[in-house]
Image: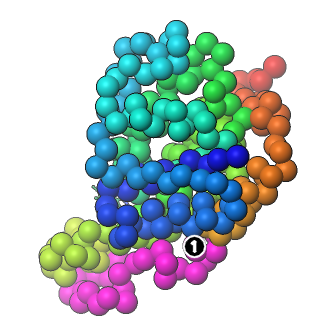
Amino acid sequence: MKILGISGSCRKDETSGVYRLVQSVLENTGMEYELVSLRGKMISGCIACLGCVTDNVCKVKDDMESLRDKIVEADAYVIGAPNCYSTLNAVTHAFLERWFQFRHQEGNLLWGKLGVAVGVGGMDGRLPAADIEKFFLYSFIETVAAVTGQGAASCYTCGYGETCGVGVPTMLYGEGVKITPDMVPNVVKQPDVMKAAVDAGRLLGQRLNAGHERSQVTLRMQAKMMERLGKSAE
Ligand SMILES: Cc1cc2nc3c(=O)[nH]c(=O)nc-3n(C[C@H](O)[C@H](O)[C@H](O)COP(=O)(O)O)c2cc1C
């Protein structure tokens, strides 16, 4: 059993809340894992060329090529993304769009696997986590847990955070805010968030150890997808 972890943050691993949470989830699975950061990777969105329809292999030449085998070989995924404009950031969205290559023909390269969705936002991490869960559902992957937290928006360190009228410090604390180190959000200072990451990792490890039946998960996710589309699964 092997788990693929993806941190979609564009910030350095050591300052990224997404990276920290994805890492914590992975560590607590008790399983073999690989954690890949999308930081600095050049990954375009799906270009709808349909080059993948016969063999399930995307023909776009970029950094996604080296990730394809890791995705196929993994038994589960822990994917995290920062909130950018109330949705996934671009590179994580592009990365997940390219999973279109797995959807053709038999289409079951990913079906019935398990996933954990991680989201971090300067205000709120729930929206990117929900987006990741939606992408999982399209591949009939069950989201066993979502972990969300508040991270440090760049406004705390850009140099204008105390005066910028549209910056997060002003939005959260009002005009005239004085930025002090203790007010800068960091997931490691949020015990409930760090506990959620530990719990999510343990749950994912338990589900994988229990020898989950991919075909059963697939059926349930297909039904959920049909429900989402407002149709019967029959
Ligand atoms: C271009 C951009 C847009 C952002 N938009 C939002 C937003 O709409 N809502 C929010 O809560 N945080 C937003 N943020 C803040 C990030 O989500 C926050 O910095 C988060 O901690 C990033 O995760 P990381 O620490 O793993 O890099 C935005 C940041 C950037 C760079």
From the image, tell me which residue sits under label 1.
193
Q: Nearer the viewer, residue 161 or 26?
A: 26
Secondary structure under the numbered disc 1 in the rendered image: helix
| Residue at point 73%, 57% (across, down) | 205
Does the image show residue 96? yes
| Residue at point 63%, 27% (across, down) | 109
Q: Is residue 129 above or below residue 58?
A: below
| Residue at point 37%, 56% (across, down) | 9
Does the image show residue 200? no
Report if residue 175 lies within the magenta region: yes
Q: Quadrant of ligand 1?
A: bottom left
Q: Is residue 64 above or below residue 21?
A: above
Q: Position of residue 13 (x, y in %)?
A: 37, 64
Q: How is the image coloured?
A: rainbow
Q: Is residue 10 above or below residue 199?
A: above
Q: Position of residue 122 (x, y in %)?
A: 38, 67
Residue 19 location, quadrant? bottom left
**Direction from residue 197 to residue 22 in the image, left or right:** left
Q: Position of residue 51 (x, y in %)?
A: 42, 13
Q: Position of residue 180 (x, y in %)?
A: 29, 90
Which stretch did the figure color magenta?
A: 172-196
**Direction from residue 118 to residue 212 in the image, left or right:** right
**Direction from residue 206 to residue 157 in the image, left or right:** left
* Residue type highlighted by circle 1: Val
